[in-house]
Image (spheres, rainbow, N blue to C red):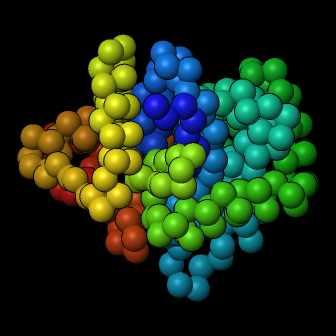
Amino acid sequence: MTTAVDFHLDPMCPFAYATSVWMREVRDRLGIEVGWRFFSLEEINRAEGKKHPWERPWSYGWSLMRIGALLRRRDMAALDAWYGAIGAELHVRGGRPHDPAVARRLLDELGFGASTLDEALADAGTHEDVLADHRRVVDAGGFGVPTLFFPDGQCLFGPVLIDPPAGDRAVRLWETVTGMLEFPDLFEIQRPKGPAERQRIHRALQPYLSGRDWVSVDRGKVIDIPRDSTAGGAA
């Protein structure tokens, strides 16, 4: 039975956040050890000629992950709390944790202190920590989040969720996901997105769409996700 997993995240991704809610449920029910790791959608989807996220004074996801990297050095539980707080702020409440003022407020509310932001950005090692996690996914052929790494070296992209299951259903999904480890030649299973599925996704993403200050990009292609949950379009 799988008892540990590394979960690579970008705090800006609504699907990774939904999956992290499920992952915490699985952890609490089965005693799974979860290592929160990083991956930058800003970097992987960076347009040619644009600055790397670490070359900017403040970069939405990258800077929040640098704060997380500093907290992780202290205690994985501190990073867990930080990711939970910034994730809920953006993906549940439609807020802007990527605004430094909001990030400082959240750090204070968690008891870490607003100055943690300045400490993290002044420490070049936090950049190196995030970059090392990011490169781990890239070197494995990964391209997005959530990406899971297991103790035997296998990694999986997903599961991609909008409504994370709880209770026994969460455990059954974990068993389904880890069941794929038995079949290393199984590379992809995907549910097609028809009109009904796209509308469900749009409804689930409304807080994120209200809080974000960027466009969504998937492997170089801008993805149009209307704020109106009844609108059509790709997801």
Residue at 85% from the left image edge and 48% from the top image edge: 120
Q: Quadrant of residue 185?
A: bottom left
Residue at left 70%, top 63%?
131
**Picture coordinates of residue 177 (x, y %)?**
35, 40
Marks counted in the figure total: 0
Is 203 placed above or below 152 here? Answer: above
Residue 114 seen in the figure: no
Residue furthest toward the bottom?
49
Place of residue 183 in the rendered image (x, y in percent of width and height, measured from the top left): 31, 53
Locate residue 179 relative to residue 11 in the image: left or right.
Answer: left
Front one among 162 and 170: 170
Q: Residue at x 83, y 27 (%)?
A: 112
Which percent across, then down, holds residue 101?
Answer: 73, 38
In this picture, residue 131 sits left or right of residue 3: right
In the image, 165 versus 188, the foreground residue is 188
Residue 9 to residue 108: above or below? below
Residue furthest out toward the left: 195
Judge left or right: residue 177 versus residue 61: left
Judge whether residue 72 can be spotted in this image.
Answer: yes
Relative height, residue 57 to residue 52 (above, below): above
Return the x and y of residue 118 as percentages of the image width and height: 87, 46
Q: Residue at x 61, y 63 (%)?
A: 136
